[in-house]
Amino acid sequence: MSELPPCPKCKSEYSYEMGALLVCPECAHEWSTSDDVTEVARVIKDSAGNVLTDGDDVTIIKDMKVKGSSNTLKVGTKVRNIRLADAPGDHDIEAKVDGFGPMNLKSSIVRKA
Ligand SMILES: [Zn+2]
């Protein structure tokens, strides 16, 4: 197992990884190590298994209801210039979508254009 840094808040050594974050089970503190580490080895792939990188263009492959909007993100919508997000969970892409504005997308519902 890789050695994780102790919790910066309570010094607990039981921190564990959750996505791009480290989590402390004792004080529930969450933090990111990406500021300290030059390159976070995190590979985000699209639905077809292509590795995505910042600046890629992707196409939506699944209709998606958008929170806070009555519109649905439709299959075939092109999303330009994506940014890989550091967010926990599976909404791992940030992008500006025409008609919707900035939002987080799941890599599992896009395909590299
Ligand atoms: Zn802690």
Image (cartoon, rainbow, N blue to C red):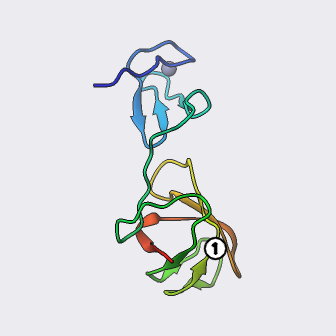
Label 1 sits on a secondary structure element that is loop
Give the residue at mark 1. 80
x then y, percent, for residue 80 = 63, 73
Amino acid type of the residue that numbered disc 1 sits on in the rendered structure: Arg
Q: Classify residue 97 by image quadrant.
A: bottom right
Q: Is residue 93 above or below residue 98?
A: above
Q: Residues within 10 Å of mark 1 (few under 14, many from 20)?
A: some
Query: Residue 39, image x and y in percent?
Result: 53, 37
- Please tell me which residue is depicted at 57% across the width and 72% down the height of the picture: 57
Residue 84: x and y in percent read: 56, 55
Is 66 above or below relative to 11? below
Q: Is mark 1 within 8 Å of ligand 1?
A: no
Q: Outermost residue, left direction?
A: 1
* Front-lying residue, 36 or 8: 36
Which residue corresponds to the image point at 59% horizontal and 58% vertical from the top-left? Answer: 54
In this view, the residue in front, 6 or 40, is 40
Query: In terms of image quadrants, where is residue 1?
Result: top left
Q: How many marks?
A: 1
**Relative to residue 7, is residue 106 depicted above or below?**
below
The residue drawn where x is 49% and y is 47% is: 88
Where is residue 103, by image quadrant?
bottom right
